[in-house]
Amino acid sequence: MIEVLRRYPVIPALIIALLLFTAVAEQWILPHNPERADLRVRHTPPFWMDHEDASISYFLGTDALGRDILSKIIAGARVTVLVVVAAVGTGIIVGTTVGLVSGFFGGIVDDVVMRIVDAWNILPGLLIILVVVLVLGQGLWTLIGVLAMISWPGAVRLVRAETLSLKSREYVSLARVAGASNTRIMIRHILPGVVNIVIVTATLGTGNIILTEAALSFLGAGIPPPEPSWGRMISEERQYIDAAWWTSLFPGLVIAMVVMSGNFLGDWFRDRVDPTLRQL
Amino acid sequence: MRRYLIRKLIFAIITLLAATMFVFGLSRMAGDPLLLFAKPGGYGMSPERVEQLSQKLGLDKPLVVQYLVWLGRVLTGDFGDTIVSETSVRKLIWERAAPTMQLAVASFILAILMGVPLGVISAVKRGSLSDYVSRTIALVGQAAPIFWVCIMAILLFAVTLDWLPVGTAGPDDVPFWTWAKFKYLVMPAFALGWGPAAALLRLTRSAMLEVLDSEYVTLARAKGTNYNIVIWKHAFRNAILQPLTTSAIVLASFVTGAVVVERIFAWPGVGQLMTDAVWNNDFPTLTSTVLVFTAIFVATNFLADMLYGVLNPVIRYD
């Protein structure tokens, strides 16, 4: 049993599975309406606390407006998953395409693309995002866009390197002799070879995207209200930290757990795909 | 070597210019800054006043000209006036620079003091309790959102234990090395330093493990050399190169962290100035602070490249 836990990332996989389940099954498992305020039960502590109002109904307590913390976390899961999947997905698709084209054709295209990626990497992402959000206004699509913007360069470099090594293989030359077009070679013969590395990049990048999204929501530039958001839950309840610690503790704990699981899974995938990249 | 550095330098400058264009362009898209002077729905400004202000701010000229004028001024150190209080942005940034520097330097030292020794210990005593503890510190540091770490630190050390104060950078009339002032620095520095410390720890650990596995270490041990000497003289010296060069990039990551940490701890630094500028739609302040931060970021990355070139003669410069 312990051997299995050591070898496979069972617990991180379970946490991610739970997150995905929560995101899909939200409406069936919500204990309370996450947006309904009820001032009579404001700042109810979690059920195990020795307090007259504490009840199993408000499992993790309530916030300053009497909204159930657990329900808000569950409702926040769906938005987070939606935003992160959309952002990482877009970033990966753009990054893979750019990396593939850049590595395959080489030359001036490659030079220009790699310089842009380099430049992108030495800019402070969060600050640029803040300016973009300020200009375009807070919105779900804006957020997905800016998060995709910071996630694409990661894939470019790796996909390009892999493409460079794959395109000199014999089977690619043979495909060319057989009369396959550039597009066909890229899609049918090189893309399948880079899929692994793409999956690894996507998994490893997810944690970072979740953290950035949470930081943006915390600063008031992320998921727009009234949509529930883990980052904003913490920011809204920050002022009550001395009276109601549970309002800030649990959303942050959830973020940390999800990010940690993502990083674990990413490391594990990477070691499986390419053991030479392993960090001992 | 020189060609490599010159190329990197030119590249850094071009990147910086591109960033200024991007930020400037965006901030002008944000809407007519003149409207900020007139309350929407309330009393407006007379046409003469509008005229006068747009001339003062240069808003009547084409965008390219505005950009070039602004860039020229910025290069000579003139960041213009803030929209909100009409004071000099340069003066504001200058006032706020010292607290941010203090915070960044303290966190940087902390990150190195925490990350490097723990990384070495964790590699040398692989599989031991201290290895697990160190790795847990690293894992949590990389996964916990920085703003949440700040709030939990406040909850624990300020609210519950009442050990450390929170809310300002401390009294102004005492130097920062006295406890009366220094105690205000402890929590923000730890919060800001934890993430980078975690990154350094992981890097040091894997570099150490790799070196400890090499033949010359085995040979040194076979000769009967004292194990401590093997670790610190033979292995550590070679393993530290990579983490050391990366530490400059780690320093750059403070730029984003500082914005959040300064916000929460009401630390009167440049990061706070920046978030305030965002809320106030104050584009001269916003563009200037983002520019200053970006310049620091690009400069530290350039330093990292340079350090890497100096310390690692094996890399090829072309």
Image (spheres, coloured by chain):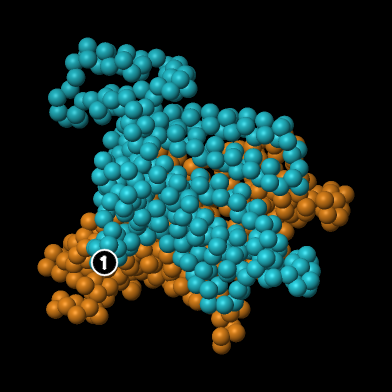
Chain colours: A orange, B cyan
A143 horizontally vs B113: left or right = left
The one nearer the camera, A69 or B92, is: B92
For residue B290, what is the image quadrant?
A: top left
x, y percent for residue A58: 23, 74
Q: Does A21 appear above or below B72?
A: below
Q: Does B72 appear above or below B244?
A: above
x, y percent for residue B280: 28, 35
Q: Quadrant of the N terminus of chain A?
A: bottom right
Q: Quadrant of the C terminus of chain A?
A: bottom right
Residue bearing mark 1: B161
- Which residue is at a point 59% across and 65% down the rendered structure image? B120
- Which residue is at a point 22% across and 66% down the rendered structure image? A244
For residue B93, what is the image quadrant?
A: top left
Amino acid type of the residue that numbered disc 1 sits on in the rendered structure: Leu
How many numbered tags mark residues here? 1
A163 horizontally vs A86: left or right = right
- Which residue is at a point 30% across and 49% down the rendered structure image? B181
The one nearer the camera, A227 or B315, is: B315
- Which residue is at a point 72% across and 50% down the rendered structure image? A161
The one nearer the camera, A279 or A209, is: A279
x, y percent for residue A259: 47, 63
Q: Residues within 10 Å of mark 1 (few under 14, many from 20)?
A: few
Q: Does A19 appear above or below A163?
A: below
Residue A114 in sight in this render: yes
x, y percent for residue A251: 34, 64
The local secondary structure at tag 1 comes to: loop
Residue A72 in sight in this render: no
B209 horizontally vs A9: left or right = right
